[in-house]
Image (spheres, helix red, strand yellow):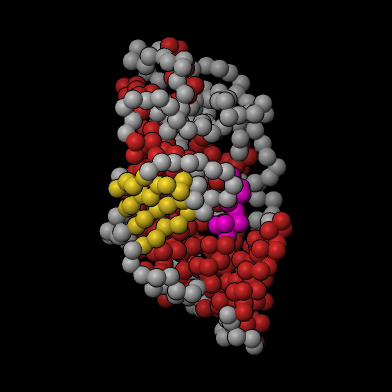
Amino acid sequence: MANYIAKSIRLTTGTITTALILTHGIARADAVLDWNTVMQSTVASQPPFPQARFAAITQVAVFEAVNAIKKDYKPYLGTITALADASVEAAAVAAAHTVLKAYFPGNSATLDAARVNSLAMIPDGPAKTSGIAAGETAAVAVMAARNDDGSAPSAFYLPASSKPGEWQPTPSCTAVGGAFYQWRNVKPFVLRNADQFRLDDPPALSSARYARDYSEVKSVGNTNSAIRPQDRSDVARFYAVTSPVAVWNPVARQLGVTAGNSVAANARALALLNMALNDAAVATFDTKYHYRFWRPETAIHLGQSDDNQATDADPSFTPLVTTPCFPSYPSAHATLSNAAREVLEKLYGSRRRSLILSSSAAPDITLRYNKLKEITADIDDARVYGGIHFRFDQEAGADLGRLVGDYVFKNSLGSIRACGCEDR
């Protein structure tokens, strides 16, 4: 659990910028890290799961361009060639700019200005020119590999029955039904398929575990709960407005600075992180729409229908934060965040650090952490105390996320020196 500092909370809409600041070290110039910040700001207009997709495409393109020059790691596509003396900084700038401008043409002026500023810091000459060419080539290749990846067109789910346990539309839903139904069919970056780690069934409605977790969210997740501590209320609101991409990319940037990473190592770390976030989103929607388990909001309103004498109904129950319009099991934020945590702990270890997490969407809240696992623990509390998930949703999401993160780390972008592979 985070040490908590807050005066009040104000929820805002629009672009969310999250800053994670380590108390040790000052950021140095690094085009990979700089353009990861640009990426995060640019994709923030999207819902969390498209954010993860765009982030992964951008960071894989940056990695592929930088790695074509440095050849420190096994490539993702392996089709990009570059001169060994090409500028890795120019390659990173060009790759990120090309991807982001292609997907977000409305941001062209801002992106073009950022490109000019970044490239102005690199001396003109053949190295710069070659780096730009490598970056642009990598961007086009990675975007082409993601064409027709299943992320579009949008698809929605309407339940065929209203039996107890079956997901039903909640007040945030439109008439078309559950959102991101197509996301279970999105092509993963690294996983073999979406159902590779599909979870077992959620707890039976008649079980003691279901009753326990039902009672918890009913007690602490109601908007007018008298037993929810203020810090848990603010954690719930904070993570309701801060997506996994906006949490974990700043974490990775600052960990890279503290570790003294090279440009190539930062490119790899950010590619692994964002591929894990994307693939975790695909995996979570596969499980969500496979089981189509109801949300606490629905379950508590209809508690008399579940044949569990320990689950009393409360038709007046209203969650503290708005229930997302898709099934409950497992928690998407838990899945994505634990995939991210797994990758970052494999890269940087799990030792204590002094971390501060803040967001412009919740400007009066600052959360202090010592370990990455404390962030995921707060995310778990945030969804339960926010009234939108059962505790078993969080635990299942954590299990799924760790499996995804571990697989992504072990099966992509490995070190050439460590594996004894030939440079290619």
Residue 416 rendering spot, x and y as whole percentages: 45, 73
Can residue 37 be seen by looking at this rendering? yes
The image quarter containing residue 377 is top left
Quadrant where the N terminus is found in the figure: top left
Extreme-left residue of the structure: 352
Q: Is residue 357 above or below residue 127?
A: above
Quadrant where the C terminus is found in the figure: bottom right
Please give left or right for residue 38 compared with residue 404 in the image.
right
| 363 or 281, nearer to the observer | 363
| 194 or 49, nearer to the observer | 49
**Which residues lie in the magenta part?**
39-47
Q: Residue at x 41, y 64 (%)?
A: 254
Q: Is residue 108 above or below residue 12?
A: below
Q: Residue at x 65, y 61 (%)?
A: 100
Q: Is residue 420 above or below residue 189?
A: below
| 68 or 372, nearer to the observer | 372
Q: Residue at x 42, y 15 (%)?
A: 314
Residue 85 rendering spot, x and y as whole percentages: 57, 86
Extreme-bottom residue of the structure: 125
Q: Residue at x 55, y 77 (%)?
A: 88
Residue 196 rendering spot, x and y as whole percentages: 49, 45
Q: How many marks?
A: 0
Residue 75 rendering spot, x and y as whole percentages: 54, 69
Q: Is residue 231 above or below residue 265?
A: above
Q: Is residue 116 magenta?
A: no
